[in-house]
Amino acid sequence: MSPAPALTVEQSSSRIHELTVVDVRTPGEYASGHLPGAHNIPLDRLQQALPALRTASARGDLLVVCASGARSATACAVLAEHGITAATLEGGTAAWTERGHDLHRPAGARTAWAMERQVRLAAGSLVLLGLIAGRRRPAARLVSAGIAGGLVFSALTDTCGMARVLAKLPHNRPRPADLDATLAALAG
């Protein structure tokens, strides 16, 4: 399967009002700042959103966004498997802000850390814990070794099992009413 088409920040910015923007980051990441008019459908809820996304794509072009472009490329591949054409934002929201564009934040929304930052905290904490506990129980150092191995595997495969686990935490989950409202807006 060929990779999803990518739009540059400049292309996306000039067409933002004619695109249906879907942000596949966690709700916490989305609340910390998203492209204007973006709809939040976390990557792990994409299957549930297929009917609404099919309807939205019939009305115009879909732009799928994440922090760097990796999750949005995965989402575009899933959509393509179901006959839905979508483009990804080259470089994600990071590139968007680097080029001087603002991110929108919902009023009163909680601000969560970006997933990459959550992974760094969890991985660093577990490595440190393994090293400290390893002073009394040498076998505890295996925790640090396991995390190190997981990070190497993550880099080689461009996947992140720890991010998948962290995405299931309550602050990274959409409230059912929020997802239902998003799907209704896309389908309508």
Image (cartoon, rainbow, N blue to C red):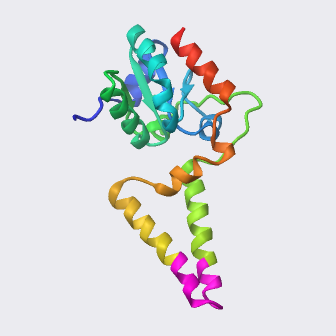
Residue at point 38%, 39% (across, down) = 74
Q: Is residue 133 above or below residue 15?
A: below
Q: Is residue 40 magenta?
A: no
Q: Is residue 76 above or below residue 159?
A: above
Residue at point 40%, 34% (across, down) = 75
Q: Is residue 139 magenta?
A: yes
Q: Position of residue 126 (x, y in %)?
A: 60, 70
The single residue placed furthest to the right in the displayed view is 108
**Quarter of the C terminus within the rendering:** top right
Q: Main secondary structure of the magenta part?
A: helix
Residue at point 41%, 20% (across, down) = 62
**Of residues 142 and 108, the one drawn nearer to the viewer in this rendering:** 142
Q: Position of residue 172 (x, y in %)?
A: 63, 43
**Numbered disc total:** 0
**Quarter of the N terminus within the rendering:** top left
The quarter holding residue 108 reads top right
**Range of the magenta residues?**
130-143
Q: Is residue 120 above or below residue 83?
A: below
Relative horizontal placement of residue 24, taking residue 73 as reference (left or right) = right
Q: Position of residue 165 (x, y in %)?
A: 55, 53
Q: Position of residue 85 (x, y in %)?
A: 33, 21
**Of residues 136 and 121, the one drawn nearer to the viewer in this rendering:** 136
The quarter holding residue 109 reads top right
Residue at point 58%, 14% (across, down) = 185
